[in-house]
Image (cartoon, grey):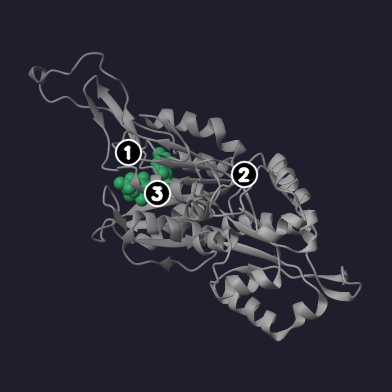
Amino acid sequence: MLGISAGIAAYKIPSLVRLLKKEGASVRVILTPDAHAFVTPLTLSVLSQEAVLSSFVSEDTDNPVWNDHVALGNWADLMLIAPATANSLSAMAHAKCNNFLIATYLSARCPVMIAPAMDLDMYAHSANQKNIETLETYGNIVLPVGDGALASGLEGKGRMLEPQEILEHTIHHFYSQQPLLGKKVLITAGPTYEPIDPVRFIGNFSSGKMGYALAHQAADLGAEVHLILGPHSLDTDEAPFTIEEINTADEMHAAVFNRYHMMDFAIAAAAVADFKPRTLASQKIKKEIGTPAIELIPNPDILAQMGEQKKNQVLIGFALETENEVAHATNKLKRKNLDAIILNSLADAGAGFATDTNKITYIGKNEAPKSFSLKSKEEVAKDIWNEILT
Ligand code: PMT
């Protein structure tokens, strides 16, 4: 959402719209009524490919239509006000809702970035500086001004940053909110089922919730996420990432190594069955034959192989323990060549399999273990990504 107030720098905003569009942004423009004198709605509409709004009510119709500033304020991921005149800064600082731009600003729930532009003494005036400070206390991001020739003929501070500089601040803002933007993340989750016969399997109690929460958080942080998920009953309809469903450890192994080489991060939250039956009975085993002996053979240790093949990936494992937890987890961290391991213990009530909560200790390579309290798996996923990224 780009708000333009009535300063001479407004003539540069069409090129900012072009730069933002080139980066893939959807741009909607609001002009204050007086800004029309500096830049035309038609130019901005052509470049943004959207109607440009200025007033609370559309004027060019027999049936006036209310322009919904509340919906616009909620639509935006970022509101950028450039140029922001002394008058607009004052109205924003004091909630003086005297035009459509200020009403949208007051309704916006997204971050707001402001590029002030005015003459030397206006910018330096204590009243204006106080307004800027006030806006910063509201959490608004106030960009610096340029130093140089001003429209009045004076020289000094007050120029709006150039469109390219504003674009860079915008990109930086999104990257700082989404540190995984442009990164690829692979996550394994859930159990594996190792079939004995057409109706029976060896499995475990994993629900996939922990891995799903990690995948969701990674997507929220901007990553392109691929989740390899064992048998589950999660509602995945709204997942903002791709999901590949598998049943057995061998299928999970194949799915992982199809992609692992392309990944920036990999987290193994799955509870992979360590063993599988040597043979798969083609028919249901009948109880009349007596109690069968099922010979087991080892499954591949997927995470250990990921550790062996690790190049630039950040590789994180889980350890589900029942005793001597930190020692066992640290051993796995080293043996599997991991960057960190997340320990959860079945000795802790509310932790581990199938619960909506977990209690973890994060053990980074060469770092002291860091323990967290019992939290929802969504909150635990945030803590884990926080640790990975710091
Ligand atoms: O799915 P939920 O119900 O939400 O439960 C979450 C969880 C308890 C399953 C999860 O938090 C967890 O601890 N996952 C790992 C469980 C496990 O198998 O731990 P492990 O200590 O046996 O294995 C160590 C690591 O090696 C794990 O990262 C595991 O994915 C991996 N592994 C193990 C065996 C194997 N053959 N291949 C592997 O890749």
* Up/down of 242 relative to 143, above or below: above
Q: Is residue 161 visible?
A: no
Q: Is mark 1 within 8 Å of ligand 1?
A: no
Tell me which corner region of the image, top left, top right, bottom left or bottom right, holds residue 11.
bottom right
Badge 1: residue crowd in 10 Å (few <14, some 14–19, many ≥20): few
Residue drawn at 46 percent across, 41 percent down:
240
Say which of 216 and 258 sits in front. 216
What distance separates the C-alpha of mark 3 from that of mark 1? 12 Å
Mark number displayed over residue 213: 3
Q: Secondary structure at mark 2?
A: loop
Q: Is 249 situated left or right of 104 in this image?
A: left
Residue 343: x %, y % from top left: 39, 57
Mark number displayed over residue 26: 2
Residue drawn at 54 percent across, 67 percent down:
97
Residue 296: x %, y % from top left: 30, 30
Q: Amino acid under label 1?
A: Asp
What distance separates the C-alpha of mark 2 from that of mark 3? 29 Å
Task: Name the residue carrying label 1.
Answer: 235
